[in-house]
Image (cartoon, grey):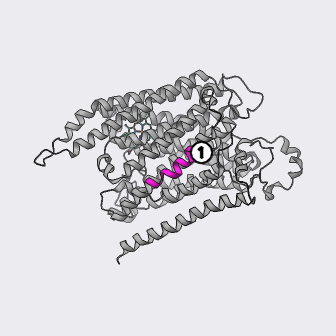
Amino acid sequence: MDIRELQGYANFFMTIFLVIMLYGYIIHLYRSEKKGESDYEKFGNIALDDEIDSKPIVPNPKTMNENEEQNK
Amino acid sequence: MQSNAALEYDYSVAKLFTYTTILFGFLGMLIGTLIAAQMAFPELNYMLGEYGTFSRLRPVHTNTVVFGFTLSGVFATFYYVGQRVLKVSMAESKFLMFMGKFHFWLYFVGALLATVSLLLGYSQSKEYAQYEWPIDIVIVLIWVSWGVSLFGLIGIRREKTLYISMWYYIATFLGIAMLYLFNNMSVPTYFATEGLGNIMHSVSMYSGTNDALVQWWYGHNAVAFGFTVPIVAMVYYFLPKESGQAIYSYKLSLLSFWGLMFVYLWAGSHHLLYSTVPDWMQTMGSVFSIVLILPSWGSAINMLLTMKGEWNQLTENPLIKFMVLASTFYMLSTLEGPIQAIKSVNAIAHFTDWIPGHVHDGVLGWVVFMIMAALFHMAPRMFKREIYSKSLIEKQFWLQTTAVVLYFTSMWIAGITQGMMWRAVDEYGNLMYSFIDTVAVLQPYYAIRALSGVLYLTGFLMFAYNMIKTMTASRELTQEPQFRSPMA
Ligand code: HEM
């Protein structure tokens, strides 16, 4: 097997691998929402409610400590 | 806590890039219209000596619209959207303010140097990678300073979740960085020959087929990460915000994102069908191009569904009109591209005018429409004035839509005619037409394209006028609009 053929096979198997990953991701998204572990749709509001003083959907603990109280 | 109450988003860098979007958009499309006219009326090549020929101006057109207009638009929207979806102001960090301004001025000076170098005829002769190595170094510095701004802002964010647009901006940054570096690896002849070669000349580190492969891996993905990914970032923010409707399906947006990232990088070899690259790689290019329809349409359909139940806004708000038409043109060109990548279709389409036709239904209908709508949306928030004229936007919309249709229909007909004439043989197997026969047949279509250029450019001038009037003379706003942009 020369290098080109090898590259071809490597590409093929990598594609299969990535397809599995991608489908796995889809399943993960829907399953975790069904189980109530996470709600992805609420992130859509990040664009709608984007004033600097509006409450973050998921506050960043690193920067929120001092003003968390204020936004409540 | 008290200081927080008065905190506002700082748009000074977004404004600077807005100005260059307008400036480079005008210059790039002016040159586009000129070279389109040159194809129809060749005498126009001889107006400015060597500097005015088609061959000298074509790369000036492509680079000005890609790296001047589009990138300015990407940066302008990033410095606007980035702050808002991360809920952090640039004014909160002196360092980030400095980096943003540094990024802008380096970019501006770099763009001038780059354009002059092309006009003087310095070129690596690779499409969209014409700039010679000293310019490439400046471009790398510009890109790094954007990266510092991008990740710096992310580092101090209040909103922990990165909104989908941010993922697309990050992908733009990483994608272009990787592609640009690899494709521009070259040996400056001056240093390799101890002072014999020209300082503005270099030789690619790859040779022959490899060089072609790297070039089109880059070239195709320059379209991906310059014309698709950051524009999708824009539509995911501006359409929901302007319409007041959250994205139809956030999960679909995540899926389309990873799908796009996964598929796009493998499709570049469709530029090299029937060439000397390995056969499996050509087939892969075709197959991945077809698969690319899925994530592309995933985003576009998500956008159209976002308008569900709100279609009245399409007639009431011209900005929605621009964005919905942009999404539709995105669907058109992401269907057309895969069709052109099918081997048997490519045998006719390759090297013909159908290719620029395809490029321009994408860029004129999708990229430019989306960027203009984004800037219109940003203007009342950045300048605290309402948009100067609604009726001018309406007129501009119809003028430019007509122009896009004229552009791609004329090039479809021209391209397919050309492809068929090149391969036509008589009963003995002799070619039926010589090259000049095709040129004579195509002339009217070139004239139509030149006309479409004039119309589109006129529309862009209306946009520029409306923006400048908005900045300077429009009614002042006391409150920031929440969703729909106010216009007179
Ligand atoms: C007034 C509007 C425009 C006109 C009249 C125009 C005209 C042209 C012409 C005549 C060419 C050369 C085609 C050839 O070599 O046969 C070209 C190439 C190109 N233009 Fe434009 N252009 C316009 C706007 C734009 C914009 C806004 C963009 C991108 C944002 C763009 C991107 C490109 C690209 C990427 C190519 C290279 C296409 C290829 O190699 O196949 N153009 N344009």
Given residues B160 and B106, the one toward you in this image is B160
> Hey, which quadrant is residue B71 in on the image?
top right
Residue B201 placement, left or right of B67: left
Q: Quadrant of ligand 1?
A: top left
Picture coordinates of residue B444, whole percent (x, y): 29, 29
Q: Could you tell me residue B99's position as x and y percent?
A: 66, 50
* Residue, far left: B428
Amino acid at circle 1: Asn
**Magenta residues, start to end:** B290-302
Residue under the point 57% across and 62% down: A23
Q: Is residue B294 magenta?
A: yes
* Principal secondary structure, stretch drawn in magenta: helix
Q: Is mark 1 within 8 Å of ligand 1?
A: no
Where is mark 1, residue-wise? B302
Residue B24: % across, % down: 51, 37
In this orientation, does residue B193 appear?
A: no
